[in-house]
């Protein structure tokens, strides 16, 4: 695609020049046609006719111009005639029979024509110089375009970085005020900003500011936004480029672009270079296919050289962002390169509220909007998720022809972001609706009956995304660590729907496939990663990424077949125990299960307050 684009850019100006040349030729042709267009047709008479007209006293005036006679008649009509060369007009006319007396009554004058410069210069300009100028201009433009095309052919070696923070880009300036949450990360970057503003203060103390700052965090947590805010605070040029923009199909392009980018940044120093998605070119070397001649590896080598080649006084800082810090080459992370690593986590409940306040600016909010409640219902949401949530709420309010955004739009948008839009066209049959109701009721009842689970926020059998129904659980507080009890409770909750179908209908459906997949994955993690099984605190399996395959990771088995058999037995044990727990709860509370399911069939949705009323009415206690 790159080479096609270059050809296209080179050919368009050529066509343009050809069109201009054709227009010029048409204009010249029009000028020539005007200059040499036949003049108004003159009345030519013979000399004998002139003599007759003189004798008839019809001629008023005769003007002699060399051999040409300009005749004016009595009625002011004009004609043209000629005489012999060097002949005297009166004698010439008398010899031809003109009456002398009548000839004397005719006014005769001689017009002397002065030779003008244009009489000889104009033909030279038109026939000689002007065509040469036109042809020369045409060839000059063709040669110039050919040179430009040749230069553009190699223009792809220039870095395609977008610049922010420089003159003319003030409208895109972002500061730390536009970045909510990320308090610790911003504190780390304040030092970088201070260095860019007052570098001499640090250099005088012999201090070396970090040359590279690596922002690590999941997708959407605000890595790029925070980097731009750093440049905005320091008020310096900010060169932004993605890691994938370095490498092209041509060998050497990536390293050439790296050199050009760093050279441009040094000229604009103090400045910031920001490389987004660093893992695209910074993967671990020496793994997978390719060797030292690999284009991606050559680009990485050039980055390492450029970062290590900075002078001590060079006030250019390299910032990079990635969510795959585990696959970066160790040479990038050593001191002197990306020696400062800043971890960005999803915002907590207070951070989410601050992020929401930024994203609802300019949106007409109703008085009942409670952003604190919205933030409490969105654990694990990143900044990008919250921005999407605020936008979905605005779209939903506009779709309903409202002039303000109400709390209901925000709460409904949470489910849309989590699960997808409602599938109103996906209408369940009466039997399917009943199965879905008992399935979701089983999840909710098991979760509400054991310790270690999160509170139920909502139960619904309205299809959203790929789910025919859902049970929404939102943690009441932020959980950074989870216990084995919580994992076992989650396993039992996941099998609650499967068990409810089996107990109620004596059969099972495909609706539990996702629940079983998640339960099996949790069980294996408990054994192989978390050391929470009878096999002891041992991690089984070594995962390593295959570079040419991308994200997924092949597992290298570092255990025997005997241990593998034990792992399978432990997985089965966890699943069977969770199934038994769910079965015991639902069998004892079968009437309550039916009550919740029938309420779901009737209302299709049960909110938290209604669910707690049902539980309190039946037992007076929701947890054992």
Image (cartoon, rainbow, N blue to C red):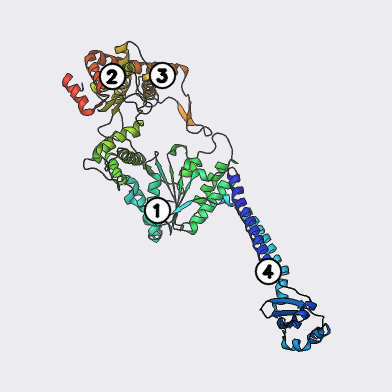
Give the mark toward the camera: 2 or 3.
Answer: 2
3D distance between C-alphas at marks 4 and 2 = 99 Å
- Badge 1 vs badge 4, beta-carbon distance below 8 Å: no
- Residue 172's mark? 1
Dot 2 crowding, Cα within 10 Å, few <14, some 14–19, many 20+? many
Q: Residue furthest right?
A: 95
Q: Nearer the viewer, mark 1 or mark 4?
A: 4
- The residue tagged 4 is 35
Tag 1's secondary structure? helix
CA distance for labels 2 and 1: 52 Å
Q: Earlier in the sequence, mark 4 or mark 3?
A: 4
**Which residue, as the protein is rendered here, is positioned at the far top?**
506
Q: CA distance from mark 1 to mark 3?
A: 55 Å
Residue density around tag 4, few if under 14, some if 14–19, many if 20 or more, within 10 Å: few
Residue at mark 4 to residue at mark 3: CA–CA distance: 101 Å
> Is disc 4 placed on a helix, strand or loop?
helix
Q: Residue furthest toward the front? A: 56
Residue count near mark 1 (Cα–Cα under 10 Å), binned few <14, some 14–19, many ≥20: few
Q: Secondary structure at mark 2?
A: helix
Give whichever of discs 1 and 3 has the lower sequence position. Answer: 1
| N-terminal label among 1 and 4 | 4
Q: Tell me the residue that label 3 is attached to.
A: 567
Percent across and percent down for residue 114 are: 71, 83
- Return the x and y of residue 391 as percentages of the image width and height: 34, 41
Residue 442 is labelled as 2
> How many angstroms separate mark 2 from mark 3 (CA)?
28 Å
Nearest-to-viewer mark from 4 and 3: 4
Q: Secondary structure at mark 3?
A: helix
């Amino acid at each position: 695609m790159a080479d096609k684009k270059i050809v296209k850019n080179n050919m368009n100006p050529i066509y343009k020049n050809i069109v201009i040349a054709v227009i010029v030729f048409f204009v010249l042709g029009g000028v020539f046609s005007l200059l040499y267009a036949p003049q108004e047709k003159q009345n030519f008479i013979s000399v004998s006719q002139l003599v007759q007209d003189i004798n008839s006293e019809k001629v008023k005036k005769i003007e002699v111009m060399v051999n040409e006679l300009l005749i004016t008649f009595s009625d002011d009509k004009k004609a043209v005639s000629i005489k012999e060369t060097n002949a005297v007009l009166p004698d010439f006319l008398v010899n031809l029979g003109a009456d002398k007396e009548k000839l004397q009554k005719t006014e005769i004058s001689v017009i002397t024509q002065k030779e003008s410069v244009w009489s000889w210069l104009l033909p030279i300009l038109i026939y000689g110089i002007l065509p040469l100028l036109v042809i020369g201009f045409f060839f000059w433009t063709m040669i110039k375009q050919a040179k430009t095309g040749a230069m553009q052919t190699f223009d792809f070696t220039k870095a395609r970085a977008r610049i922010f923070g420089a003159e003319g880009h003030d409208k895109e300036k972002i500061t730390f005020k536009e970045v909510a949450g990320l308090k610790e990360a911003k504190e780390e970057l304040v030092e970088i900003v201070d260095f860019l503003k007052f570098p001499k203060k640090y250099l005088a103390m012999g201090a070396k500011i970090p040359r590279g700052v690596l922002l690590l965090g999941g997708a959407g947590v605000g890595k790029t936004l925070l980097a731009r805010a750093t440049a905005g605070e320091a008020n310096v040029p900010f060169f932004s480029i993605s890691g994938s923009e370095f490498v092209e199909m041509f060998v050497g392009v990536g390293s050439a672009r790296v050199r050009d980018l760093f050279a441009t940044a040094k000229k604009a120093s103090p400045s910031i270079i920001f490389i987004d998605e660093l893992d695209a070119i910074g993967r671990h070397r020496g793994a997978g296919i390719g060797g030292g001649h690999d284009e991606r590896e050559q680009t990485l080598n050039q980055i390492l050289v450029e970062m290590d080649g900075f002078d001590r006084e060079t006030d250019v800082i390299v910032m990079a962002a990635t969510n795959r810090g585990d696959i970066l080459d160790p040479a990038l992370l050593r001191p002197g390169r990306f020696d400062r690593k800043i971890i960005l986590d999803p915002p907590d409940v207070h951070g989410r509220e601050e992020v929401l306040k930024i994203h609802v600016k300019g949106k007409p909010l109703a008085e009942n909007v409670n952003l604190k409640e919205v933030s409490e219902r969105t654990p694990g949401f990143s900044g990008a998720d919250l921005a999407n949530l605020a936008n979905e709420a605005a779209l939903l309010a506009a779709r309903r022809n409202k002039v303000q955004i109400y709390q209901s739009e925000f709460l409904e948008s949470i489910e849309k972001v989590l699960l997808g839009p409602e599938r109103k066209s996906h209408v369940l049959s009466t039997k399917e609706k009943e199965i879905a109701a008992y399935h979701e009721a089983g999840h909710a009842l098991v979760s509400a009956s054991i310790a270690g689970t999160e509170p139920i926020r909502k139960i619904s059998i309205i299809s959203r995304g790929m789910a025919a129904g859902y049970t929404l659980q939102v943690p009441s507080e932020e959980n950074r660590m989870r216990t084995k009890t919580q994992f076992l409770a989650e396993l039992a909750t996941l099998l609650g729907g499967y068990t409810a179908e089996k107990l109620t209908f004596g059969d099972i459906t495909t609706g539990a496939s996702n629940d079983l997949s998640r339960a099996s994955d949790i069980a294996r993690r408990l054994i192989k990663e978390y050391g929470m099984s009878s096999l002891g605190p041992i991690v089984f399996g070594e995962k390593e990424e295959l570079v040419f395959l991308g994200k997924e990771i092949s597992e290298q088995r570092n255990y025997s077949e005997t241990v593998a058999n034990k792992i399978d037995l432990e997985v089965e044990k966890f699943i069977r125990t969770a199934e038994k727990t769910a079965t015991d709860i639902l069998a004892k509370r079968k009437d309550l299960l039916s009550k919740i399911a029938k309420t779901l069939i009737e209302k299709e949705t049960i909110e938290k307050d209604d669910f707690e009323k049902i539980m309190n009415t039946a037992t007076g206690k929701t947890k054992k």
